[in-house]
Image: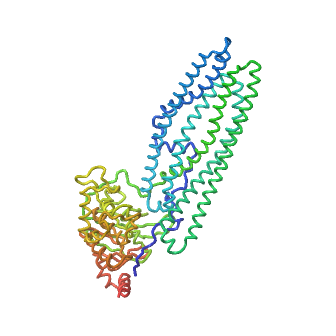
Amino acid sequence: MTTATDEPDVTDVPEDLLDADGARIESTSHLGVFATLRRGIEISPEITRGLWITLGLATLAATGRVVVPLAVQQTIDVGILADAGPDAGRVALLASLAAGALVLAGLCAALVNVRLFRSAEAGLATLRIKAFRHVHDLSTLTQNTERRGALVSRVTNDVDTVSLFVQWGGIMLLVSALQIVVATGLMLVYSPILTAVVWVAFVPMFLVIRYGQRYVNRAYTLVRERVGAMLGAISESVVGAETVRAYGVSERTGRRIGGAIEETRAAQARSQVLVAGTFSSGVLISNLVLSIVVVVGTLLGVGGGLTAGQLVAFLFLVQLFTGPVQMATEILNELQNAVAGWRRVIAVIETPVQVAEKPDAVTQERGPARVTLRDVRFAYPNGPEVLHGVTLDLPPRTKVAVVGQTGSGKTTIAKLVTRLMDPTAGAVELDGVDLRDLSFASLRERVVLVPQEGFLFDGTVLANAAYGLRTPLGAGSSPDQDPAEGRISSTQRAAVEGAFAELGLADWVADLPDGLDTEVGQRGEALSAGERQLVAIARAYLAQPDLLVLDEATSAVDPATEVRIARALDSLTAGRSTITIAHRLSTAEASDLVVVVDQGHVVESGPHDELAAAGGIYARMHASWVAQTR
């Protein structure tokens, strides 16, 4: 006897069956730091747009900061300590010139910030869009190798870490690097000896930091993975809150989430300890260098090697040198965090698309749909075959019911016919053309799947049904009228009203609190399962496909809704090819052709009356079903 459920969906396939031939989304990319940055810029070239102009402005901003040491040196040596006595006019002039230079440098720094912010946001928007679109291009098998919440985290949370660095750390790293170069050049002018002292003191720290960044990188990579796992666990528990309450497993669920949060906290703490150690070493060495410069500079000054103004200016330059060095240690740590997030997004984008459109894909004309399966075989990665050489020829405008025991392969056939998956051998054809040769636009226009659970987006009944409109903008519409955003034109509304009427559902719509404008809630949870299915049927009706693939959904609804669904399905399927995964044999009785699947083989095929009288598997299934329904 058939049951209300089919073989397990891909979410129930053992994990080891999903890890083959590029089917798994890697937890992170294995690119090095610079390779990650190069690949990230390749994906989001907007980040480097106008870079040379930005570098020029950053150079002016960095140069402007060294005006103060120069002004101080000149003020002391030729203004205050002038041979003829203090020169107030020269001091005022130097102060005015320094102030003007600082204002100009500040304006340049502001422009650098604006330019980097705009280019970073443009590039990261591209990164998000590409990652999001690629996720949708991945097959169902590939998507289910990672929790939905963790997958969403890659497109949102991980990109945010990149955004934070590019907008803040990128600016600071750019300006700091230029400031170090400019400060070093001026220090060499004043005193090569003191400049050598500064660099000799800092070179070991640079080497230690470079070595330590490896550990920081590993720590932040672990942090990004733990954050993704935590968000995945939280998202899953929120979506399944009703089940959690119904089975009284709140405490167990809380422990699981608490464990994920604790692992995230521990990873964050370990990374921050490394960051604190790196930053503290920078502060310690900076203070040490300043002390050494004061001592050595004073000795040089006493010996006549430096004037008082030059020594004071050099101390200012050391501060301009050590400040960016200290800042750079923190920025480099943030860079590792950003790179860890960037790698996880890149890993998604570089996951191979197993169900892909060919470059030379063809477009078919609309018309009655004939479906042919030629020696079709299918196996989940690393698993045994679940379909064994299935061959079928389903004539156009025929109502086909596919029946079989749980796990027989019925739903797999439906997913192959709609090309949610590709066969491992053989071919599925639509009007004689292999589905792999068809463009996705043509395939989705001709073939529509109505799943057992009608998924609805947060919005109104009207907006959800209008998703099925092939040309969203009808006559009298404007470009800003899009069902996906709840903006519906009068033409679109009329089409949706007509669809519900033609499906015999006008009375049901009239009984809703706000008619077509009734809010369905997240995932359609404000409606019952049967009501969600009614909206899904109307959506499919508006799509006007040539071939409908239905996963029968009347097993968990009340009798009145079941009657409505059955009546709507009669209108939906009239005059077009349909393949129904039949969980109730009443559907098979009303079909033109019944296909019986058993352990991955098509064992019987023919009209209901013939199969019921043949004494085979279908006859026994039907007899058992009749006995239970009496």
Give the colour scheme of this rendering: rainbow
Q: Residue 340: x percent and y percent?
A: 57, 49
Is 161 situated above or below 366? above
Can residue 83 be seen in this snapshot?
yes
- For residue 310, side relative to residue 16 (left or right): right
Q: Locate residue 586: give its quadrant.
A: bottom left
- The residue sitting at 44% across, 43% down in the picture is 122
Determine if residue 547 is in view: no
Foreground residue among 112 and 589: 112
Q: How many marks?
A: 0
- Residue drawn where x is 71% and y is 36% of the image: 287
Query: Quick one: quadrant of the C terminus?
Result: bottom left
Q: Is residue 577 toward the left or the right of residue 319 in the image?
A: left
Q: Position of residue 347 (x, y in %)?
A: 51, 52
User: Quick one: 110 or 481, which is closer to the camera?
Assistant: 110
Residue placed most toward the observer, 74 or 55: 74
Q: Quick check: 56 left or right of 443?
A: right
Position in image of residue 618 (x %, y %): 36, 81
> Would residue 22 appear left or right of 192 to someone viewing this image?
left
